[in-house]
């Protein structure tokens, strides 16, 4: 039984990694109109809402989105609330 639980955990982790890689690959193929937003010189990334929603639609959770975009988890959650969607 312990081996079965371990295998399930491994499969879940691999699934999570697979989702993240899929999104990152999709982003490399997609052009963003504001390429300057990706520069590391800016401390605050304006206009991250579109990317946050895109990642969310790809199945990533708020924590993973925050890690990828470099914005706080609370900001990601705020951007994903229905009121913030236009």
Image (cartoon, helix red, strand yellow):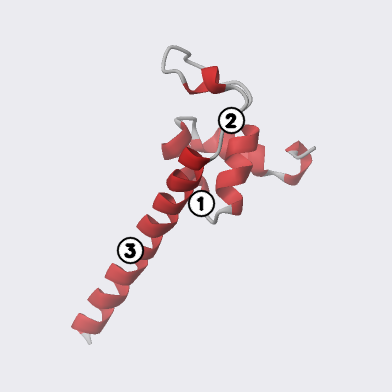
Q: What element carries label 3?
A: helix
Decide if residue 1 is on the left or right side of residue 12.
left
- Return the disc, 2 or 1, that comes first in the chain's sequence: 2
Q: Label 1: how many residues lie within 10 Å, few (<14), some (14-19) or many (20+)?
A: some
Say if residue 64 shows up in the picture.
no
Q: In which quarter of the image is the C terminus?
A: top right
- Return the disc, 3 or 2, that comes first in the chain's sequence: 3
Q: Mark 2 points at which residue?
A: 32
Number of residue marks = 3
Decide if residue 13 is on the left or right side of residue 79.
left
Residue 35 or residue 46, whichever sits in front: 35
Say if residue 12 shows up in the picture.
yes
> Residues under labels 3 and 1: Cα distance?
15 Å
> Residues under labels 2 and 1: Cα distance?
22 Å
> Residues under labels 3 and 2: Cα distance?
28 Å
Find the residue positioned furthest to the top.
Answer: 41
What residue do we see at 32% from left, 71% from top? 11
Q: Is residue 17 above or below residue 2?
A: above
Q: Mark 3 points at which residue?
A: 14
Q: Residue 70 carries which label?
A: none
x and y percentages locating residue 80 in the rendered image: 65, 43
x and y percentages locating residue 26 in the rendered image: 50, 46
Q: Residue 61 carries which label?
A: 1
x and y percentages locating residue 37 in the rendered image: 54, 20
- Tell me whether circle 3 and circle 2 mark residues in contact (CB < 8 Å): no
Q: In this view, does 18 lie above or below 52?
A: below
Q: In this view, does 32 lie above or below 1?
A: above
- Front: mark 2 or 1: 2
Residue 5 or residue 49, whichever sits in front: 49
- Tell me whether circle 2 and circle 1 mark residues in contact (CB < 8 Å): no
Q: What element carries label 1?
A: loop
Residue 79 or residue 39, whichever sits in front: 39
């Amino acid at each position: 039984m312990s081996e079965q639980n371990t295998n399930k955990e491994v499969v879940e982790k691999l699934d999570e990694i697979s989702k993240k890689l899929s999104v990152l690959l999709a982003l490399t193929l997609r052009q963003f109109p504001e390429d300057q937003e990706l520069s590391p010189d800016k401390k605050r990334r304006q206009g991250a809402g579109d990317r946050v929603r895109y990642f969310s639609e790809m199945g990533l959770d708020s924590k993973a989105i925050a890690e990828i975009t470099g914005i706080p988890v609370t900001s990601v959650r705020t951007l994903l609330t229905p009121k913030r969607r236009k």
